[in-house]
Image (cartoon, rainbow, N blue to C red):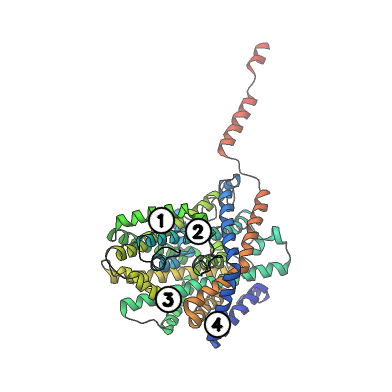
């Protein structure tokens, strides 16, 4: 390992904390699970309002920044252009940002809300419940999650490519917190721990779904040991991929992911209830936009209940836990784009793809339950991990679709973990764009280990708890990042627009032309 690793406080502290959690979870899994459950309840009950308000404020800030005069500033030099093509860029965003999670929840969430509606006065498994389910699913996978990724990526990208500084979160916060070493190390350690917990949650969810799919296709029952084997296989795959670098392994796998996802999406769209999918997408989009503010700030202080905590607050916390990694990765692949292009691309295109996905897969499940008397929602309520595969049973070539989906989940997990090892190594090696391979191996091992421990200690609930707790201190950091980028941009000279440049040249030419009247007098 690089000798500088042992001199890096961030690397040592964060690696020790994650290692201790792995050991505790492995030695006393039941106690670890009980403590995690208590922390989950404490966090959601007392700080749920903070998560909701923070994400809502971030959205308003980013939209305002995109339409402001600062939107023309480029993440890089003025003459620099994007490093990756638009298709590859979107593929990388989709793979790193939420691919595996969307495959898991794309059917599971709308069918869950359809079975148990999120509001009072609506009966489950009815037309009203279906409409509400689609609107809330769009909301949870829409702009809000991506605003969290966007703010982190924006500040890091601006500093890294515009100011030629390192891509550390602590450096991004220097305009607010100063340059004290202790403060910077604390911020970066929190970012690393949150990232590990966020990616562990995604690996765990993906493994649970793969296990569910293997059960449907091959009759392999849900087992912790099967899940451990899957984690080991994923670990080997993403460590092999990470050794090839960003331009090869991650790039090619991201394109494979996006291509395979599009194939599955088009097949289900064409072979499923196409008109229903289009109509439910349109109506769901309308409900999402109409109720956006209400959904964003919804809590239950008067009548109690845990729905908002179990769904919206969990999603926001999961996104916040992911944000140091996804933000840094999004910044890395967005070099050369303007702030306006970056914000609109990150906050509009991936959420739109997510809504299309949910309308297609979740809509197909809803249509079958409403019109064909199937029991997909009931099966999903019994086991979330089989949601996608239960839906495939009512489509042609269901076995092939299931196998391809298991492959898609696998490649999504590999690209996510591959990207995360690179970002974590960079974060713990002073922001290096080419961190040592052994540092990647350390973080690759710890990510898989914490995912395995969480699954062993409590399954889905433990995974949700890990993200939620790790995200709490980082939520405050996100709000500080908003003020930091505002201060940085206020000092930045604005690029000259082409229209202004043409106007300036016309005025200059007019000033240099000799006056005709003066010529006649002479």
Q: Which mark is residue 284?
A: 1
Residue 331: give x, y in percent of width and height: 55, 59
* Comes first in the chain, label 4 or label 2: 4
Q: Which residue lies under the disc numbered 4? A: 34
The answer to whether one can see residue 163 in this image is no
Numbered circle sitting on residue 295: 2
Q: Quadrant of the C terminus?
A: top right
Could you tell me if the residues under marks 1 and 2 are in contact, i.e. CB atoms within 8 Å?
Answer: no
What number is the disc on residue 483? none
Q: Residues within 10 Å of mark 3 (few under 14, many from 20)?
A: many
Give the Cα distance between marks 3 and 2: 29 Å
Identify the mark nearer the N-term, 3 or 2.
3
Disc number placed over residue 208 in the picture, else none: 3
Q: Residues within 10 Å of mark 2 (few under 14, many from 20)?
A: some
Contact, CB < 8 Å: mark 3 with mark 2? no
Q: Secondary structure at mark 2?
A: helix
Residue 332, by quadrant, is bottom right
Earlier in the chain: of badge 1 and badge 3, it is 3
Which element type, helix, strand or loop, lies under badge 1?
Answer: helix
User: Mark 3 and 4 residues: CB-CB less than 8 Å, in contact?
Assistant: no
Q: Which of the marked residues, 3 or 4, is nearer the chain's N terminus?
A: 4
* 1 vs 3, front mark: 1
Q: Which numbered disc, 3 or 4, marks the residue closer to the eye?
A: 4
Where is the N terminus found, in terms of image quarters?
Answer: bottom right
């Amino acid at each position: 390992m690089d000798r500088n690793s042992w001199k890096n406080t961030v690397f040592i502290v964060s690696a020790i904390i994650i290692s201790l959690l792995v050991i505790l979870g492995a030695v006393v899994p039941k106690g670890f699970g009980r403590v995690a459950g208590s922390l989950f309840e404490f966090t959601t009950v007392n700080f749920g309002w903070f998560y909701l308000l923070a994400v809502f404020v971030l959205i308003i800030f980013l939209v305002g920044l995109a339409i402001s005069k600062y939107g023309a500033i480029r993440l890089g030099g003025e003459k620099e252009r994007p490093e990756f093509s638009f298709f590859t860029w979107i593929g990388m965003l989709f793979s790193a940002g939420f691919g595996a999670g969307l495959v898991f929840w794309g059917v599971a969430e709308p069918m869950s809300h359809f079975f148990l509606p999120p509001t009072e006065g609506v009966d489950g498994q009815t037309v009203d419940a279906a409409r509400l389910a689609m609107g809330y699913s769009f909301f949870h996978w829409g702009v809000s999650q991506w605003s969290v990724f966007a703010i982190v990526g924006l500040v890091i990208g601006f500093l890294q490519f515009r100011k030629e500084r390192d891509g550390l979160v602590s450096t991004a916060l220097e305009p607010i917190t100063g340059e004290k070493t202790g403060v910077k190390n604390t911020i970066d350690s929190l970012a690393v721990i949150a990232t590990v917990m966020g990616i562990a949650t995604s690996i765990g969810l993906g493994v649970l779904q793969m296990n569910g799919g293997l059960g449907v296709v091959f009759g392999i029952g849900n087992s912790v040991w099967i899940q451990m084997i899957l984690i080991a296989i994923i670990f080997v795959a993403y460590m092999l991929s990470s050794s090839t670098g960003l331009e090869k392994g991650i790039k090619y796998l991201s394109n494979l992911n996006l291509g395979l996802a599009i194939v599955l999406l088009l097949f289900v769209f064409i072979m499923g209830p196409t008109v229903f999918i289009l109509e439910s997408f349109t109506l769901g989009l309308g409900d999402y936009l109409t109720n956006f503010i209400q959904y964003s700030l919804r809590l239950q202080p008067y009548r109690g209940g845990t729905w908002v905590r179990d769904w919206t607050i969990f999603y926001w916390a999961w996104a916040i836990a992911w944000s140091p990694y996804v933000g840094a990765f999004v910044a890395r692949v967005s070099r050369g784009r303007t702030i306006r292009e970056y914000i609109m691309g990150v906050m509009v295109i991936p959420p739109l793809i997510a809504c299309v996905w949910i309308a297609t897969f979740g809509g197909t499940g809803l249509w079958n339950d409403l019109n064909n008397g199937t029991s997909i929602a009931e099966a999903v309520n019994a086991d979330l991990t089989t949601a996608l595969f239960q839906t495939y049973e009512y489509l042609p070539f269901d076995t092939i679709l299931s196998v391809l989906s298991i492959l898609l989940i696998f490649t999504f997990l590999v690209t996510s973990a591959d990207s995360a090892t690179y970002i974590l190594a960079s974060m713990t090696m002073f922001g290096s764009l080419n961190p040592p391979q052994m540092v990647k191996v350390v973080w690759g091992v710890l990510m898989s280990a914490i995912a395995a421990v969480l699954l062993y200690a409590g399954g889905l609930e433990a995974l949700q708890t890990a993200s939620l707790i790790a995200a709490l201190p980082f939520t405050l950091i996100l709000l500080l990042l908003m003020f930091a980028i505002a201060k940085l941009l206020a000092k930045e000279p604005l690029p000259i627009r082409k229209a202004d440049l043409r106007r300036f040249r016309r005025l200059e030419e007019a000033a240099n032309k000799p006056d005709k009247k003066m010529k006649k007098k002479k």
